[in-house]
Structures are given as C-alpha cells and as structure tokens.
Amino acid sequence: MAPSQLPAALFAACAVFLTLAVPLIAGDPDMLQDFCVADYKSLKGPLRLNGFPCKRPENVTANDFFSNVLAKPGNTNNPVGSAVTAANVENVPGLNTLGVSMSRIDYTPWGINPPHAHPRATEIIFVLEGTLDVGFVTTGGYLYSRTICKGEIFVFPRGLLHFQKNNGGAPAVAISAFNSQLPGTQSLAIALFGASPPVPTDVLARALQIDGGVVEVIKSKFPANY
C-alpha cells in the first residue's frame, strides 16, 4: 500500500471499529453476578439509580424470585373493559437486571386494551382464552393487524403504538412477555388528554383538526394522573 493511502485506510478501519463498538458501549452491561435482587428499602434514602440497587446476597430468599400476581383475573369493571396485571421488577424483586417481565391481560366481551406503547421493550402476546384482534402502527403510519386465537402469538415491536380487542362474546385472557424488567406503558389517550400539566387545548385542536370544545369534553374523561 502506498504511503499516501495509509492514513485513509487507518481512518476507514477506525470508522468501522467505532460503528461496531457503539452498540456494545450503548447497551446494558453484562451481568457481573448471578443476580441482583432489588432492594426496595434503599430507595427510601437519598440514593437514586437507573433501576434498583441490589440486596446483599445473605438477605436474598427464594421468595424474591416468586410471585402469584398473575394467578388471579384483574378487575375489568372499567370503561375499556380490560385489566393489565404486571409482573415486573416493581413487584418481583428477583427480576432486577435480568431484562424480562410479564403481564396478564383480562378482557370483558368486546373489551379493548387501548392504543399504547412500551418505550423500553418489545412485547410478545400469547392468547390463553378467546380470540383477539391485534395490531400495531409503524412510524410510517402503516397498520399491521390480524386476528389471533387461543394458543397463538403476536409481536409488537418496541416503542410502536399497538392495541388488542376481544372480538368475541365471552371473556378473553392473554399473557404478554417483555424484554425489559420495566417496559413502561404510555397510553395514547392519557398522554394527550390526561397529562399534567395538560397539553394545551389549542395544540390538540389544531393537531386533531377538531373544535377546542370537543377537546375539553374529551379531557374531562381523562383526569390527570399526577
């Protein structure tokens, strides 16, 4: 290789190396111990972390890795006719740092799990009972949807708006799994109409091309959560 070509070749090699290394640097680090059971009590003090600190190993028990939170149906007596029961690091301390969690979704006949997104996880849903209409919308505005039945699964990519609807006259049940210990859930309706402080009415009216009075009526159905 000619001397004049050497700097360009070194630059190209460095660029390739950095491109490959960035995902490794940006991602979560590998586990440095067998587990890191969440120590909820430590959060009552001044310490704040991106996640939960670990219990001392001698204080860990088998119950830290156990939960029956998904054993019972959720309360579906609400306007949307569904209930989501989560099993994540907030109620199963053994999930801390493991990057997985689950939820149970119960639906009344024709109940829906309204459009929402999980900013930190991809979701895979498995139908235990019933038949669901499911779908997600891409960033380009395309809807991927279909019907799934008992024993079938569907995947909702991370961060994309998605929904489920029980399309039968009997209750339905599904189990969802996530590749995050705390996937987060952002409801479209609550984000727009139930935020605190509220999203300005004129912003929503122009974005949705409706009258401001209509926006106020919708807001009245979603009282602020904070």
Image (cartoon, rainbow, N blue to C red):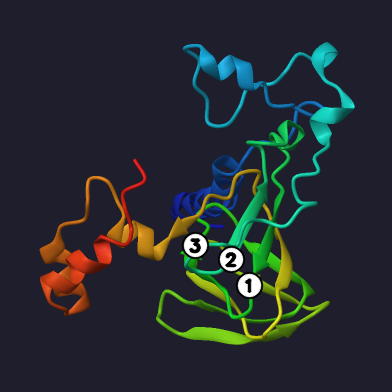
Disc 2: which residue? 82
Which numbered disc covers residue 108?
Answer: 1
What's the distance in space between the residues labelled 2 and 3, CA to CA?
16 Å
Which numbered disc covers residue 132?
Answer: none
Q: Residue at x 84, y 29 (%)?
A: 63
Using residue 106 as the reference point, say whether residue 118 is left or right of it: left
Question: Of callouts 2 and 3, which one flags the residue occurring earlier in the amino acid sequence?
Answer: 2
Q: Residue at x 47, y 76 (%)?
A: 138
Task: State the image coordinates of residue 47 (x, y, percent, origin top left).
Answer: 50, 15
Which numbered disc covers residue 117?
Answer: 3
Judge by depth and name the residue closer to the eye, 82 or 135: 82
Judge by depth and name the residue closer to the eye, 202 or 105: 105
Give the vertical position of 201 relative to 108 (above or below). Answer: above
Q: Are marks 1 and 2 in contact (CB under 8 Å)?
A: yes
**Crowdedness of circle 3 by 10 Å Cα count: few (<14), some, many (20+)?**
many
Work out whether residue 68 can be spotted. Answer: yes
Q: Secondary structure at mark 1?
A: loop
